[in-house]
Image (cartoon, grey):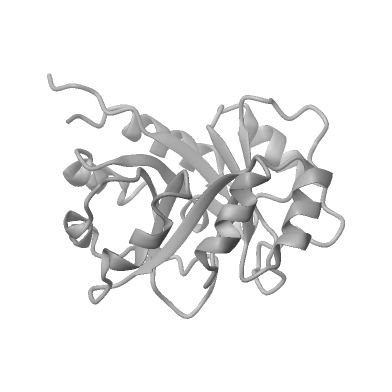
Amino acid sequence: MGEKKNIAIKICGMRDHENIMEVATLSPQYFGFIFYAKSPRFVGEDFSLPKNLPRSIKKVGVFVNEGNATILLKAKKIGLEFIQLHGNEKVAQAEELKAAGLGVIKVFSVNDEFTFDETTPFKKTVDYFLFDTKGKFYGGNAETFNWNILRKYDQEIPFFLSGGLSPENVHNVNDIVSMNIHALDLNSGVEFSPGLKSLEKIKSITQIATNFEL
């Protein structure tokens, strides 16, 4: 038996209080909340967290080309611990968020032509990168990309793997598990409908992920 790879789980696109608390019983390491009005998983203008949400689950706010004044206001009001920058944000914006005491996750949309040189300016600022599938929509396209592209990445900054992960394909992550993967980012692949997650699908992925071997 090889050495087990410990990979965190992030459930993104949460917004329904009852569903949030149900999924919380599975103890994922992160919840993602989308503050982008054009997303079908937009939390809405008056979103708040359930009062009994376990502190062990880190709260991530997902923003797309939003100004830091709004981001910082939301972070303080709601209790966000990480900010996921999912648009064309610049390094200076990430630096300001970091200086405010927030963790920063910078998203890059990947296709076969992607060059990881784009990540370099952010390396001294972010906590993590997130590699998602390049497509028409911000905040996810429910499709996987060619994970072999990640072999061109220098693995310096740990990353979240995103893009159409589901119980049917997540076992393939074991082929790249030796890379610097910090977490699996789950969204549409574990849903009944936009914003509502299936506990059984999350359990299935979590079980598979716990058996990844280096």
Rendered-image quadrant of the C terminus:
top left
x 63%, y 54%: residue = 96
Q: How many marks?
A: 0
Left or right for 163, reference 12: left
* In the foreground, 187 or 158: 158
The extreme left residue here reads 1
| Image quadrant in which you'd find residue 25 | top right
x 71%, y 34%: residue = 21
x 28%, y 41%: residue = 180
| Image quadrant in which you'd find residue 115 | bottom left
* In the foreground, 6 or 155: 155
The extreme right residue here reads 46
Instruction: Note whether residue 80 is visible.
Output: yes
Looking at the image, residue 159 lies above or below residue 111:
above
Looking at the image, residue 10 lies above or below residue 74:
above
Picture coordinates of residue 43 (x, y %)?
A: 74, 58
Instruction: Note whether residue 164 is visible.
Output: no
Left or right for 75, reference 104: right
Rendered-image quadrant of the N terminus:
top left
The extreme bottom residue here reads 136
Picture coordinates of residue 56 (x, y %)?
A: 62, 25
Left or right for 112, reference 200: left
Picture coordinates of residue 192 (x, y %)?
A: 58, 54
x 61%, y 68%: residue = 64
The extreme top residue here reads 1
| Image quadrant in which you'd find residue 153 | bottom left
Picture coordinates of residue 181 (x, y %)?
A: 32, 42
Looking at the image, residue 104 lies above or below residue 137:
above
